[in-house]
Image (cartoon, rainbow, N blue to C red):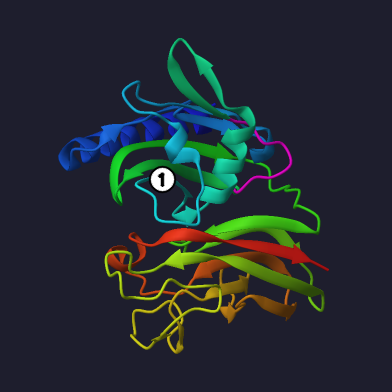
């Protein structure tokens, strides 16, 4: 009981700080419900986002390989989980009292981890955060069910760390193929739009992987694994156990990453 009371107090403090930050930044508030709680298993969680009446939610939820004025981002403890979030809310989306509610209650896949989880949802218009909401969940159980192969996911152009929810074992051979396009400098019409192979070499020290092409699709095993270039086709021989994470190579500054548009469709198979 003391543990739960402490959790609630922490959640209230974080919520006050979060709302204050939004007001200072003139960003609209998204209501994520519940805003805090304790759960035995992250895979049985359910949360709802109430979106503002003045916006049309559909353009934000429509993934496109081309530049778009509207998009949504989702993070858990700073990790990009947008693909998971979009898949979840598309499955349970509904309308209620003229106000759009996005419901997420996936049972067989979760990016939530044991301990405290900070969930952040952002609605962007022309690469600026217009609405943002957050919630704080404590998860007790370490059990997790990973997805089986084959599997397909979208890696957004602005992604630095996309969770696949696919776990590989040391020595396992996995086939990765990708297609799609990402604009890494959409404001510059003359800069080439990237395929999963990338474009020009990213030599800056701020690149996610220096010496590899800008816009190239990258993969790693585990949060602390080393990045490997996928391109449009790659056979991965796992050197350790761990979950597959994907990213698009670019300079890892907010200015450089946040303007990226488009996505890569990645297929993972044995």
Which residue range is magenta in the image?
104-112
Residue 101, relative to residue 213: is it above or below?
above
Q: Is residue 57 left or right of residue 95?
A: left
Q: Main secondary structure of the magenta part?
A: loop
Which residue does the image show at 22% across and 41% down from the upper left?
A: 21
Residue 260, relative to residue 63: is it above or below?
below
Image coordinates for residue 98, horizontal then vertical, percent: 43, 13
Q: Quadrant of residue 105?
A: top right
Circle 1 Cα neighbour tier, 10 Å, few/some/many (<14 / 14–19 / ≥20):
many
- Tell me, yes or no, if residue 57 can be seen here: yes
Locate the C terminus by quadrant: bottom right
Q: Quadrant of residue 60?
A: top left
As for residue 108 lying within the magenta part, the answer is: yes
Image coordinates for residue 43, horizontal then vertical, percent: 68, 38
Q: Secondary structure at mark 1?
A: strand
Residue 151, relative to residue 138: is it above or below?
below
- Tell me, yes or no, if residue 226 can be seen here: no
Furthest toward the front, the residue is 190
Which residue does the image show at 52% across and 73% down from the upper left?
A: 195
Image coordinates for residue 23, horizontal then vertical, percent: 19, 35
Q: Nearer the viewer, residue 167 or 96?
A: 96
Q: Is residue 128 left or right of residue 257?
A: left
Q: Which residue is mark 1?
A: 71
Which residue does the image show at 50% across and 57% down from the upper left?
A: 65
């Amino acid at each position: 009981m003391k543990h739960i009371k402490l959790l609630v107090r922490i959640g209230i403090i974080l919520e006050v700080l979060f709302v204050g930050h939004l007001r200072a930044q003139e960003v609209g508030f998204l209501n994520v419900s519940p805003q805090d709680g304790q759960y035995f298993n992250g895979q049985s969680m359910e949360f709802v986002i109430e979106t503002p009446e003045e916006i049309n939610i559909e353009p934000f939820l429509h993934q496109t390989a081309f530049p778009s004025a509207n998009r949504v981002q989702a993070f858990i403890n700073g990790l990009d989980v947008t693909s998971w979030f979009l898949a979840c809310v598309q499955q349970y989306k509904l309308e209620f009292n003229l106000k759009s509610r996005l419901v997420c209650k996936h049972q067989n896949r979760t990016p939530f981890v044991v301990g405290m989880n900070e969930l952040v949802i952002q609605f962007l218009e022309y690469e600026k955060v217009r609405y943002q909401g957050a919630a704080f969940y404590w998860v007790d159980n370490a059990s997790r069910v990973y997805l089986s192969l084959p599997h397909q996911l979208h890696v957004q152009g602005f992604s630095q760390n996309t969770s696949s929810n696919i776990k590989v074992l040391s020595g396992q051979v996995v086939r990765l193929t990708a297609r799609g396009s990402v604009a890494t400098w959409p404001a510059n019409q003359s800069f080439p739009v990237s395929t999963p192979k990338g474009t020009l070499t990213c030599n800056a020290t701020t690149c996610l992987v220096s010496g590899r092409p800008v816009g190239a699709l990258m993969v790693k095993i585990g949060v602390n694994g080393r990045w490997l270039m996928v391109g449009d086709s790659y056979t991965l021989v796992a050197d350790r156990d761990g979950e597959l994470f994907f990213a698009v190579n670019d300079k890892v500054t907010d200015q450089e990453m946040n303007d990226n548009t488009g996505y890569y469709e990645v297929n993972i198979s044995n």
